[in-house]
Each structure stands twice: as C-alpha cells, then as structure tokens.
Image: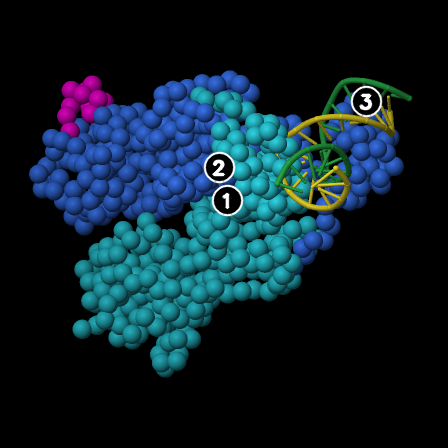
Chain colours: A blue, B cyan, C yellow, D green
Amino acid sequence: MGAAANRAVTLRDVARLAGVSVATASKALNGQPQVRAETRARVVKAAEQLSFSPNTLAQGLITQRSGTVGLLTSDLEGRFSIPILMGAEDAFGSDQTSVFLCDARGDAIREKHHLRALLSRRVDGLIVVGARPDTRPSLGRDLPVPVIYAYAPSDDPADLSLVTDNIGGGRLAVDHLLRCGRRRIAHITGDPGYGAAQDRARGALDRLAEEGLSLAGGEVWFGMWSEAWGRGATRMLLDRCPDVDAIFAGSDEIARGVLDVLHEERIDVPSQVAVIGFDNWQVLAANARPPLTTVDLNLEQLGRTAAQRLSAAMDGALSSGVETLPVRLLTRESTAPLR
Amino acid sequence: MGAAANRAVTLRDVARLAGVSVATASKALNGQPQVRAETRARVVKAAEQLSFSPNTLAQGLITQRSGTVGLLTSDLEGRFSIPILMGAEDAFGSDQTSVFLCDARGDAIREKHHLRALLSRRVDGLIVVGARPDTRPSLGRDLPVPVIYAYAPSDDPADLSLVTDNIGGGRLAVDHLLRCGRRRIAHITGDPGYGAAQDRARGALDRLAEEGLSLAGGEVWFGMWSEAWGRGATRMLLDRCPDVDAIFAGSDEIARGVLDVLHEERIDVPSQVAVIGFDNWQVLAANARPPLTTVDLNLEQLGRTAAQRLSAAMDGALSSGVETLPVRLLTRESTAPLR
DNA sequence: TTGTACGCGTTATCAG
DNA sequence: CTGATAACGCGTACAA
C-alpha cells in the first residue's frame, strides 16, 4: 500500500523550489493580480512538480470557513438521505464544500455526540434529515452555525425546514387518475400516525371533492407501510367495492402489495384498475409488474435547495418557517386512460 | 434561525474567564497531570459556561492528523455504501473520526475531483467502495494516505481490498438447501459478466459436486439482475424441469421474480419448492411472500473491518492483497425441511 | 512586483 | 504548578 509516499508538501516547499517567498507563492497560486506572469508560471510549475495541494485546514483557520457541512440523519437505510446528500453535494460543488455524513440511528444521545463533533470540526452549516416526514425536535436556537431541516420539519417555527408537498402529491395522484377517466378511486395508505399519510389523503380527498366525488370504498384505508397491508387492504376493498377502477397507494411498498393481489385476481392493470404509488422507490417501482406510476419526491432537488438555503444563511441571509417543495408525477405503465 | 449566536469562542476566551494562560487552559482541558485540581476545575467550568468546543482544525494542524477519513463511492443508491459507512463510523467512534461521504456517480473525472478535495482536506485515510463486486482501477500507489478498497477490489495487488465471500455464499446457500433435504436444486442468477455471479455459481456447483449432484435444469441460468429475469427464467425452468424442489437465486431481486411465478403457478413455497436469495436487501427480502431466506453480505462488518485496517495502516501497519470476509445465512420462511 | 511580518487556534517545550 | 514562546500551513496588510 502506497502510504506516506509524498508526505506533507507545503507551500514552503513550493516557494523554495520556485525561488520565491511563501507570500508570493500564495498569491501566484490564488490568482492574485499583483504577480508577474513569468513568476506565476514558475510557481505553478513547482506546485505541479510536487503535486502540492493546499492544506484546507490551515486555510480554514484563517478564513474562518472550513468549507464543510454536516449532514445529520436518522434514516438507517439512507433511502431519503442519499438523494438529498447527492443534491446537496451537487449544489455545493465538490471542490468548494465537502459533506460529513453522520447517522444518529434514531438515538438522541448519538445525535448530540455527532453534533458536538461536527461543531468541533467547525462545519459551516448543518442539514438535518429526519427519518420520517413528521415534525422532529429542533437542535436548538443557540448554535453557532445555520441549520436547515430537510424532509422532517423542526418543531421550532424559528428554524427553516424544507419538506415535500404531500398534500400536493395526493392531489397530483388523484388528478392523474381522473384524467385517465377513472371515477371510482380508492386510497390505501400507511400508518395514520404519520403526518405524511394524513396529508396525502387530504390532498386526494380535496381533489376528489372538487369533482363532486368521494372515495371508492367510502373511506381511506389506513394501515401500515408494508406490502402485506397493501395486499390485505386490496382484498377487503375488492370485496366491498368490486367495481373500483383505480387505487392510489400511499407508498410504493403498499402499491406492490396492491398489484400482487390484482394480479392474483386476474384483474388487469391498468386496463381494469389503474394503480399509482408514492415515493418512486426505484427498486420497487421500476421492477413492479407492470412498472409503477408513482409520485416522485424530488429529493435531489430538495437537497439542492437545502444547500442553497444553507449557503444563503451562511452569508447572513437567514430565513425561517416551513418551505414546501413540489413533488412530481412519474408515469409508467400502471396507469393509462380508459379506452 | 439562531445562526451566529455564540461565534467562535476560543481557548483564549476560556483562559481569560478562568484567569489563567492559554497554555494552562489547554493542559487543564486535555487532562494533563501537571495542573492543580482547583485550577482545572475553574477552567472546566469556564469552558462549560462558554460552551467551548476546541477547534479541530487547529488541533489537526499541530498533530498532523485531521481525524477524518474519506469514503469514496460510486454506488448511486447507497445500497452497499451505507451499511459499510455505518460499520466504519461504528468502528472509528464518532468523536474520534468523522467521515466525508463522496459519490463519484461512476464518473472517473468526478472521482479525481473528489480525491483532490479529500487530500486537500488532509483526510487520514480513504475507503473506496465500488458499485459492483468486481475489480476496479486502483487510485494509484503514490497517495499520501492509506487506502482500503471495500466491496470492489482494486486491480493492483499491492493495495488492500476487502471483499465479501461470494464463493462461500454460494456454498452456504446450497448447503442450506441440501440440509432441507432438497436434491433437485436450480440456480438462477444475473449478468454473467459479473465476477459475483460467477463466484456464487462456482460455490454452488462445488458444494453440489461434493454430494455427487449437478444442477437441476442442467446449467446455471445466467441473465440479468432483475425481477423480470427471475420470472422469465423460472417459467423456462418449470417447463424444462417441473420436478425442481429448490431454487437458489443470485440476488434478492431475482428471488422476488422467482417467488412471483411460483405463486402464479400455485406451487407452494417452501413445501414444494424452497427459494433462497442473496444480498439480504431488506425491503425486498423481508416483504417477500413468504419472507425470503437469503445470504446476508455482512456489510456492516465489512465496514468495521475496513475501519480497523485503515487505523492499522495509519499507524504504519500496512498490508496488501485481497481479504475475503465471510457472509452468513439469514433464515426466513422461504426455505424449510421437506416433510 | 516581491518579501516581511503577523495572526488564525491549538499544543508542546521550556523556563520560571 | 504555571506561563511565555514557538511552532503547524497559510493568507494578507504593509513595507520595500
């Protein structure tokens, strides 16, 4: 293993090789105007020869900016965190800002620990990603760096939180089904204790009401976020309401269960019943039979926005409140117009 | 947003408040013995009052250690990276070492970029996680910090790589099926261009050979890593070899496809046909019908080991070659002894 | 145009 | 036991 090959080449080494002072070397490398072109060239060449890379820690000491941010998550599977992280990485620019990823695993103690470590590392800002889209405790108001809450909003309205538009998503799903000519639409979703479940249902009901319609089956089928519940609920639904022509599932997992039972019952999707999911969890949605139309959470965009808001806050442009970001419909084959 | 509340409280502030010099304050806080107990108490109290947290950047400047490592991945979905990251975080201890997560998205240029940034940040080491378990290009031998390749081995034998035991996994799967009394075992797997597919098949064939058996269906069914292929292959298999009593799938995705078709054909799992997957991709395996017995890759353990090897390397104990880490069987309900 | 000197926050080495 | 003082690597007024 090629460890410790060229150890710690500093600006001094570069300056020495180029025959100039450290100050000049610094200016040359940082593109400062007050340096002769020929000199700059010599310095740059020396730096390349030694494959010099400036010590960001030292730079940070001076500029009071570490060029790092912390991403604090409790999302074990990284299902939400990763897209958000990628979006943030994208917006920051990889050579400007690097991201510390810390997983608190839903443990408040561990979270405190990570927080201390990150502050000690002088991160310029913090993005907190919750495991579920419900309110979570604020990190507090007296932190030395700005904090953005993503996905799960903070319980302190003085914080800035970025959330996905679950109500809008519910509307979007139902709207799409209506456009496909469906009128007997059912909604099977997860744990009613989740704000997201309530919001998605609300959006669906609102849109339906605008058409003077109500839910097939009479009510929202709340249950659990699992395939098994999707299957169970679908069986009950078909029993009670055999003429249903569309099912809006509150998650892609549930939608998979729905599809399974429809398939078992030899009910064709989408010609007889259209199915739409929520989350766009790739491995589930794209591999479904048929591939699943679903509501994409736009998490990368959420990550990008979080990065932008954080940059703004680092420049002093604080803001607060809850900002709701749009979701979007991703059409695959499980929905289609009625012939 | 409570940004910039207490900005940059330094050791000087603490010292001033405690009425001592910075030197003494430093010693007191770092548990150095040569300091009076009463003085130490005063300093500690002052530090708490100001909620002082030492500037790791400055510390790193002196100790020549940043207390950070870079995790360089190309694994978009984070499916492998995340467990590895968590294992590594675990082994490092969150207050000792923080992890920079960088996603190169399979792009060599972006990888170079990230690498430069990480070296500039003076990471103490690097963990490189490949997107697929096949050889990947080495980062090179002349890096100033140790590198561990995880999941995907480096093509340079001088590097240290940690990989999962795919051959052993194949053996394990077949061994389990044999113990369940199955004798007509088929193997449906993914892209033959993947070393992992070849290795898993090899392990399976070897174990079978030890019993004087060969594969049901006569050959390994190579194809793609998708549910659709799992379905297609299973249909062909049942056609050619209707008396099969066990199917070893090369991935959980494929296994899901297998289960789907068996269910369609009203073939009971596990009483008629046992099914075993590979990867233990939670959302697929645990939600399957029935829940899927599978080979767990032990990725957290791999992450922990990577961290340990990296620590050792940072202390000068370099090593090289490919280290193969054991996988383990996770029994659920899709396999059971024949009555 | 270039170099000198100082400081960023911390630790370590010495005197006192 | 405590306190100057010198690093660590770099950026930047200021002087030359």
Mark closest to the chain's N terminus, 3 or 2: 3
Tell me which chain the residue with mark 3 is part of.
Answer: A
Q: Residues within 10 Å of mark 3 (few under 14, many from 20)?
A: few
Where is residue A164 drawn, in percent x and y? 36, 28
> Which residue does the image show at 18% across and 50% down from the upper left?
A264
Dot 1 surroundings within 10 Å: few (below 14), some, or many (20 or more)? some
- On the same chain, marks 1 and 2? The answer is no
In space, the residues marked 3 and 2 are separated at their CA atoms by 42 Å
For the magenta stretch, what is the residue range? A205-215
**Secondary structure beneath disc 3?**
loop
- Residue on which the image places disc 3: A34
Q: Position of residue B298 (x, y in %)?
A: 42, 59
Distance from disc 3 to disc 1, alpha carbons, whole Å, reads 43 Å
x and y, in percent, of residue A222 in the image:
18, 36
Q: Quadrant of residue A272?
A: top left
User: Is residue A206 on the magenta stretch?
Assistant: yes
Identify the element where label 2 is drawn: helix
User: Disc 1, disc 2: CB below 8 Å?
Assistant: yes
Mark number displayed over residue A116: 2
Say the numbered circle drawn on residue B95. 1
Residue A255 position (above or below residue B206) = above
Residue depicted at 56% across the width and 37% down the height: B39
Name the residue located 67 percent from the left edge and 42 percent from the top edge.
Answer: B62
In this image, A219 relative to B152: left or right? left
Check residue B160 for magenta coloring.
no
In the figure, is residue A62 to the left or right of A69? Answer: right
- Label 1 amino acid? Asp
Q: Position of residue A209 (x, y in %)?
A: 18, 21
Whole-number angstrom distance, CA of label 1 to CA of label 2: 8 Å
